[in-house]
Amino acid sequence: MATRRSGTTAAGARKTAKAPLDDYLVETLMPDLVGHDHSPSSFLVYVKLWHAAGGPGRRGIAISLSNLAAETGLSKSSVQSALARLQKRGLVRSSRSGPTAVPVYVVLAPWRRG
């Protein structure tokens, strides 16, 4: 993806430090979301948010559904469904400052203690 001088990617999200993935995420969560729940889009959205946040619980990521869809290659409706599944499973928390505000997502890792 091309980088603009302002430090944002072509899709408009800020560049962030990379966060290593937990073994649990790859060995347990991926097969559970993809195989059991039949929702590979949920896994893609979770990994994208994990990466953008620099890991779980670090900071909230303000990103629109349209930008999240563009950055994952998914449709907007697939992203909406994935976010609903992730929130229901306690893997992502979202908040808005108003009804038309861009949501802020916080990545959670309930398997981590502390």
Image: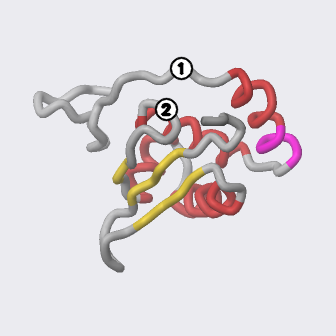
Magenta segment's dominant SS is helix
Of residue 49 and residue 41, the one placed in the foreground of this image is 49
The residue drawn where x is 30% and y is 41% is 13
The residue lying furthest to the right in this view is: 36
Whether residue 78 sits left or right of residue 66 in the image: it is right
| Residue 4 locus on image (x, y percent) | 17, 30
Q: CA distance from mark 1 to mark 2?
A: 7 Å
- Crowding around mark 2 (Cα neighbors within 10 Å: few <14, some 14 to 19, many 20+) is many
Amino acid at pointer 1: Pro
Disc 1, disc 2: CB below 8 Å? yes
| Residue 102 locus on image (x, y percent) | 33, 64
Q: Earlier in the sequence, mark 1 or mark 2?
A: 1
The residue drawn where x is 71% and y is 56% is 89
The residue lying furthest to the front in this view is: 114
Q: Which residues are magenta?
A: 32-36
The residue drawn where x is 38% and y is 51% is 67
The residue drawn where x is 63% and y is 63% is 84
Tell whether position 35 is magenta.
yes
Q: Give the residue pinned by disc 1.
A: 20
What's the mark number on residue 55?
Answer: 2
| Residue 73 locus on image (x, y percent) | 52, 42
- Labels in figure, total: 2
